[in-house]
Amino acid sequence: MSDILDLGAREIARAVVAKKTSALEIAEDALARAHARDGAVGAYLTIVDDVAREQARRVDAALAKGANLPLAGVPVAIKDNMCLSGTRTTAASKILGNWVASYTATAVQRLLDAGAIPVGKANLDEFAMGSSCENSALGVTRNPWDLSRVPGGSSGGSAAAVASGTAAFALGSDTGGSIREPAAFCGVVGFKPTYGRVSRYGLIAFASSLDQIGPIAKSVEDCALVYEIIAGADPADATTVERPVERTLDAMRDDLKGLRVGIVREFDLAKLEPEVRAVYEQAYRDLERLGAELVEVALPTADYGVATYYLIAPAECSSNLARFDGMRYGLRVEGVDVGATYEATRAAGFGDEVKRRILIGTYALSSGYYDAYYVRAQKARTLIAADFNTAFEWCDVIACPAASSPAFEFNAKSDPVSMYLMDYYTIPMSLAGLPSLSVPCGYVTPSGSAKPLPLGLELTTPLFAERALLGVAYAYERGTRHAEKHCPPALEAVR
């Protein structure tokens, strides 16, 4: 298998365009590597061999005719809550276990039009509900850095695919941290654009006012490249913004001179384990070393983020998942009448976490409780967004941990509350709709483990300031070099 697969997306595309290799050769190498490595990692629910080869042939034919394809031959993993026509698309749920998509999501189609090669559909927490990828009903995904640990969630398969080298980049979706947290756990870059910047058409909905598609990649530069391709208005999605997509690849910075970086007073690092705290303190010092000025900012409502999110998101999921009733598509378990069929289908098809969130959401929306819970949560969301606006009057970008710990062992967080708190640092940004990313910032070796595990620094800018955000992240990435460890120790034996 060619070492070209270890390059970034831009380098792979340049090699294909220059005819140093072909898209079909890349596809064959990527498929061979996926089949060789994924038995250990489990990043994919489906490897799409025939689709990949067919797309590669189309790319090679288009290049022969002079087409401009910025992702020519680049292998991509697609989170399995995004439709790809003719492929099994499951959202990692039994209720959609054998459903084959009849159309392609807009973001996925834009990648195909740019020449990307789909390797497979990546595992996730069922319907994107989770922070560890343990809630998948269809497969187990392991962290490529330590196979006894989770990859993070819900886009765990997407992050694991990139970290294991079976895809140059992946698409994930982020509702409350589902791109940024698995990217941090797997030592890669995960980028959530501003809500409405990327079309959600063809994304199986969890919480419609929060869901956003974004890239996971080996580098900030590759995230910027993918963002430019998938972003932009889409008539099929009324929530996309009619706003030109700015160039980001020419915004990469060499340093952070003149930049004000906000450190959130309420995000007290003293609450973290000492070795984790030390990594984030060093990350803040690195920002200063690169020329930034650190300023303290306040987000007084940040502590309400988790409670707010776990009312709004379940309420929206309760509504969105009502369509899975066994009548039109997906699993059907026959009952004695229509009501019994609904009940039997949903009882058999949904996992425990999905049922829990449907129940929470239905309760929050029910008569007598709507004002007390859902309406209050929406008011709190407005206050959180206002606090960010105030904070950005004092700084250009906010820096904080992407996660409170490195990847944990399977079943280590068996109660829902401890799992929900994993998204403490990422949820406020999602509620405010802000662009945010995680970039590798260092490594820790947890007690009882001989293996170093990555951590991620979360960076956030105001709405639609993706250009500035990616430039800052690039300068930090280049100035620290943490993101250059692309082959996790757990996979050295299957290189």
Image: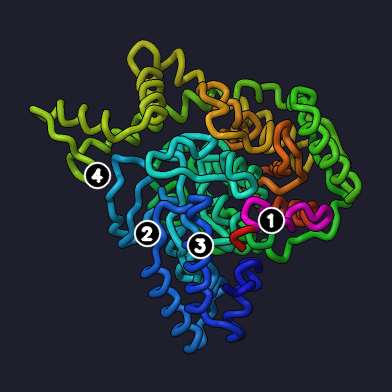
Residue receiving disc 1: 467
Q: Is residue 163 visible?
A: yes
Q: Position of residue 81 (x, y in %)?
A: 41, 48
**Which element is circle 4 on?**
loop
Q: Earlier in the sequence, mark 3 or mark 4?
A: 3
**Local secondary structure at mark 1:** helix
Main SS of the magenta part reads helix
Q: Residue at x 73, y 31 (%)?
A: 447
Asked if the magenta segment contains residue 488, the reply would be: yes
Which residue is more in the foreground, 337 or 495? Answer: 495
Mark 2 element type: loop
Q: Which range is magenta? A: 478-492
Please report the residue visible at 68 percent of the width from the left and 61 percent of the height from the top: 221
Res 276 → quadrant? top right
Does any portion of residue 456 appear in the rendered image? no
Q: Where 308 falls versus 137 (above or below)? A: above
Which one is in front in this view, the residue at disc 2 or the one at disc 1? 2
**Quadrant in the picture for residue 225:** bottom right
Q: Coloring scheme of the render?
A: rainbow
